[in-house]
Each structure stands twice: as structure tokens, then as C-alpha cells.
Amino acid sequence: MNEIHSAAIICIASILLLAACGGESPVPELKMVPQTALLLVHLEDGLNQDTRSLLSESIPEFELADSLLKSGPVGVALVGIDITSLEPQLLLLSEDVTEQYASALAARQLDLDPRQEENRVDLINQQGYARASVAERKGWTAIYLGPAPHITIGTWLDLDEDNSMAADTALGSILPEDAHISVLVPGNLFGFLSFLPLERQLSWWQNYKDFTAELKPAALTAGLNWPDEPGDSIFLSLAVARKEAGTVTIEVAAENTGMNPDSAAALVFTLLEGMSL
């Protein structure tokens, strides 16, 4: 933490009234993500290469998202969790690739065979089961990774904006601006986590539940702008839309002096603790 404290300069730490955002959304895929989703990560090109490598090593699905990112911004939504295997069910979204390109890319990286269906392309494993599906609508291409892909992609093809994350006013009020990576956490995830009895497995779980009970989050977002060039500034923003007390926003700028992703993660947790005060 000494490295962080010596490099970081807190620019803004303020409590704001809940207000609506105007103009074009910095996260345009919100209208393409079901409102029931648990998490959305928006990626822009230019993110620090060390961070991208760390994400690729830690999250197998990130390699596919990183490949899509070469063509333009990408959204990665956690639309569910398989309760039997605890595997994430992911929806990857892009305005800059076609269904044909996305199908070929996903099939190659996931070692699956594409099979054309009426309104989608299913990706089939060696046992003959569909493990992913690709479709496009209204200029957007979606890749779904998870069980029963025909059901999830079918629902996505019929999704209207009123039932999308774009209709979440709490989330829309705290969207990060000009970030290489934006993490959007709707109230759904906090509600989902509050029902998990993990106190015996995780020693810190009760502390987390106490923390969120005090903070009362309706939505949370984080934005990170982290370029490769040494000397360029790293910008981190955290915002929480609270159910009863408006919006808390914290922004931090730090000189890029070789801070690694682990140090940045420690800074994030420090700021989150400050938000609960």
C-alpha cells in the first residue's frame, strides 16, 4: 500500500444527489443486456497489456473477449450461474463484428463445431451438445457461453429495451466515462449474494454482508483508465447509487509508475471501505 499512497492523488471524493445522465451512453450495449443480468463489464481498446494478460490467464473466457476487442468495444454480461457446476453463463456483445466472424472466432478458440440454425449459429462439442450460440440483431452480435444456448439466445433476440439493463435508472445514473474497462453491478447481484450462506466456507463473508447492509447499494460501478505508457495517468472511479442516500462517487488519479494489477486491486478495496463511512 505504500506504493499506492505515494503515487495516488485523490482528486474528488464527494457525495452527490442521484441524477440522471444525459447524452449518448458510454456503455451502449446496456439495451442489449437482459435486466436480470448479474454483472456487465464494458471493455475499450487501449487497456494496459499487463492487465489484459492477467485477465486472460485468470478468466478463460476473457481471451475470446480480448480477440473481439481488436475490432471494437465489447460487453461481457454475466446473465446467470449454473447452480450445478457454478459455471458462469456469459453473453458477449459487439457492434463491430458479424455473426459469421464471431461464429468462426468462437468455434476456433473454444474448439467447437459451428452448426447453422434458423436464426443463430450453435457451437457443438464432440459429444454433440451445443455449448455456445451466436446470433445478431439490430447491428449487434451476441455470443452466449453456457447451457441451453438456444433458450438464452432466443430470449435475447426478443429482448426489448424496457426489459434491459438500460431501464435500470440507478445504474444509468453512475455510468463511468472514458474508461478502458467499466464494471457495472446492478442491484440483482447484491440481492443474489445476500442469500448465499457462505459463512462457513468464507471467513470474511459475514463482514461483506454487514458492509452491504450498511451501504444499501442499489447499483455500483467502477471505471478504470490504465494506458500502457509509463508516466501517463491512471484514473479509477467508483460510484454507488444508494437506496436511501443518493450517490457516492470517488475518483482517484495516480501516475503510472509501474503499479501492478495487485496493487490496483488493493486500492479498489480501500476506496470501497471509504464509501461505507
Image (cartoon, helix red, strand yellow):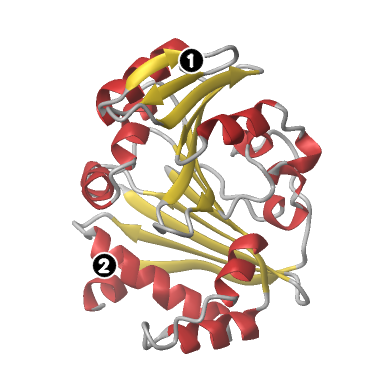
Q: Quadrant of residue 9?
A: bottom left
Q: Quadrant of residue 112?
A: top left
266 left or right of 187?
A: left
Amino acid of disc 2: Ser
Q: Is residue 225 visible?
A: yes
Quick one: which residue is furthest to the front in this view? Answer: 127
Residue 19 position, x and y percent, is 78, 57
Q: Quadrant of residue 104?
A: top left
Pick whichever, 26 or 37, lies toward us: 37
Tell me the residue at 59%/76% (across/down).
195
Please tell me how many numbered marks the rendered image carries. Answer: 2
Pick whichever, 11 or 22, lies toward us: 22
Label 2 sits on a secondary structure element that is helix
25 left or right of 134?
A: right
Amino acid of disc 1: Glu
Residue 31 position, x and y percent, is 68, 35
Q: Is residue 98 visible?
A: no
Residue 66 tag number: none
Residue 86 position, x and y percent, is 41, 59
Pick whichever, 70 or 234, lies toward us: 70
Circle 2 residues within 10 Å: few <14, some 14–19, many ≥20: some
First reached walking from the N terminus: tag 2 or tag 1:
1
Tell me the residue at 21%/59% (across/down).
260
Q: Quarter holding the N terminus?
A: bottom left
Figure check: 195 above or below 116: below
User: Disc 2 vs disc 1: which is toward the camera?
Assistant: 1
Circle 1 residues within 10 Å: few <14, some 14–19, many ≥20: some
Residue named by callout 2: 263
Tell me the residue at 28%/71% (across/down).
4
Residue named by callout 1: 99
